[in-house]
Image: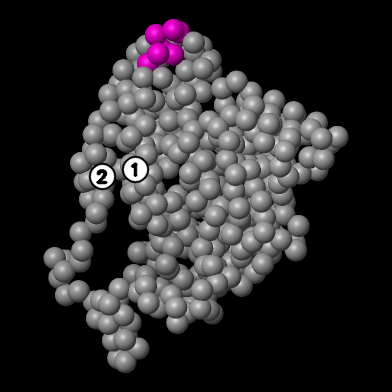
């Protein structure tokens, strides 16, 4: 039985006393937790299909569902690890570098397969994150050439496919092409952490330290806590009750309320940006600043009728749009990507201009926040 958090909280006793043998799973927000004695399991949003599959398969031990849910529950860092991230979209590289950096990973970046091959000729890495779908040398061709470099020094190196196409059987497909594993774009921490645990040597993973925590002592980090929050913390410690705002008007308005009103899933975007509002705003600014140039590239490929390259460009938009929570625009781009791959010119001609219009409108809305 899958139970939404509000329903569970309204009738907690009923769900905690489900008949023996009946499994209950609470779908909840990130900050929610079950009591220590609960027989239920919690899935925090956003969650992956892999978590559900493992759960339904009965894999709730250390190597199954529990591992997929380990982010925030079993924190770790990877200080000293050197990684290369390769993607033809600068925005995807900024996100990858930002997320990987919170684990203490030192990240170099490349915007093309050719550049990545040249980089690997002179540098040594512990892991490579490689975009699967790029113009020129795609991920498969780039991987093959990297494996052959420097007398085969990279033959056993973990090379992880970065992909916005997570179809059934994706893991087997990527492994057959020579990849060690794959991570969907935008990057989800639960999947990233599972992959890092799997592919990196155990001596490169240090537990008991939260991602993003550089090890600064608590007395030093306390200086960065806003005074208003300190007062709330002190009130909670003294009385056991938080000094919460009394009315809706007392809650601060979301700085992204305009985007929420336009149908943008701001919480999803924040999740992909490690919950960091400043990082999310940086991604919004980059999405907006690159918008005109990206629209021109897509339109140029439309005019030339190069549907294969057109598919590559709208594929990139699918990923970057989802990174900021623009689910509708991402879905539009996905449909045109599929049409480009199958050479469906009629579908592209019928939907191309509505995509560009939606893209332009979203950029204008971002400019207004």
The span shown in magenta is: 298-305
Along the line of sight, the residue nearer the viewer: 136 or 343:
136
> Are dots 1 and 2 in contact, CB under 8 Å?
yes
**What percent of the width, then of the height, locates residue 210?**
55, 68
Q: Give the numbered dot on residue 1.
A: none
- Residue drawn at (43%, 68%), measured in percent from left and top? 32
Q: Residue furthest right?
A: 151
**What percent of the width, then of the height, locates residue 173?**
69, 33
Left or right? Give the position of 234 relative to 179.
left
- Residue drawn at (34%, 13%), measured in percent from left and top? 350
Please tell me whether residue 300 belongs to the stretch shown in magenta. yes
SS assignment at label 1 = helix
- Residue drawn at (61%, 55%), measured in percent from left and top? 105
Q: Main secondary structure of the magenta part?
A: helix
**Tag nearer the camera, 1 or 2:** 1
**Visible in this render: residue 58?**
no
Which of marks 2 and 1 precedes in the sequence?
2
Q: Residue furthest bottom?
A: 238
Please tell me whether residue 157 belongs to the stretch shown in magenta. no
Determine which residue is flagged by label 1.
284
Q: Quadrant of the C terminus?
A: top left
Q: Quadrant of residue 323?
A: top left
SS assignment at label 2 = helix
Determine which residue is flagged by label 2.
259
Relative to 61, is 56 above or below? above
Relative to 233, is 24 above or below? above
Q: Quadrant of residue 151?
A: top right
Along the line of sight, the residue nearer the viewer: 172 or 71:
71
**Visible in this render: residue 280?**
yes
């Amino acid at each position: 039985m899958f139970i939404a958090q509000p329903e569970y909280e309204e009738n907690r006793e009923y769900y905690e006393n489900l008949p023996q043998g009946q499994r209950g799973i609470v779908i909840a927000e990130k900050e929610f937790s079950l009591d220590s004695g609960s027989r239920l399991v919690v899935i925090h949003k956003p969650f992956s299909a892999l978590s559900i599959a493992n759960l339904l398969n009965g894999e709730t031990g250390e190597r199954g569902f529990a591992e997929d849910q380990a982010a925030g529950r079993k924190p770790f860092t990877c200080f000293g690890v050197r990684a290369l991230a390769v993607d033809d979209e600068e925005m995807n590289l900024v996100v990858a570098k930002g997320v990987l950096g919170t684990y203490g990973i030192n990240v170099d970046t490349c915007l093309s397969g050719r550049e990545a091959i040249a980089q690997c000729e002179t540098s040594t890495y512990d892991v490579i994150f490689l975009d699967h779908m790029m113009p020129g040398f795609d991920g498969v061709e780039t991987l093959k050439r990297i494996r052959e470099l420097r007398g085969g020094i990279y033959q056993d190196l973990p090379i992880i496919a970065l992909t916005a196409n997570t179809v059934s059987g994706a893991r087997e497909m990527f492994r057959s092409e020579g990849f060690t594993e794959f991570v969907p774009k935008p990057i989800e921490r639960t999947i990233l952490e599972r992959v890092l645990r799997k592919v990196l040597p155990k001596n490169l993973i240090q537990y008991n330290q939260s991602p993003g925590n550089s090890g600064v002592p608590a007395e030093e980090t306390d200086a960065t806590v806003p005074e208003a929050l300190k007062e709330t913390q002190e009130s909670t410690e003294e009385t056991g009750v938080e000094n919460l705002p009394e009315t809706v008007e007392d809650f601060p308005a979301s700085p992204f309320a305009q985007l929420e009103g336009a149908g943008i899933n701001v919480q999803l975007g924040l999740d992909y940006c490690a919950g960091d509002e400043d990082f999310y705003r940086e991604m919004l600014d980059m999405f907006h600043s690159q918008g005109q140039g990206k629209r021109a590239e897509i339109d140029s490929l439309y005019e030339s009728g190069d549907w294969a390259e057109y598919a590559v460009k709208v594929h990139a938009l699918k990923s970057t749009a989802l990174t900021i929570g623009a689910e509708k625009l991402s879905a539009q781009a996905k449909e045109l990507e599929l049409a480009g791959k199958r050479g469906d010119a009629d579908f592209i001609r019928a939907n191309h201009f509505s995509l560009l219009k939606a893209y332009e409108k979203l950029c204008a809305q971002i400019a207004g926040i």
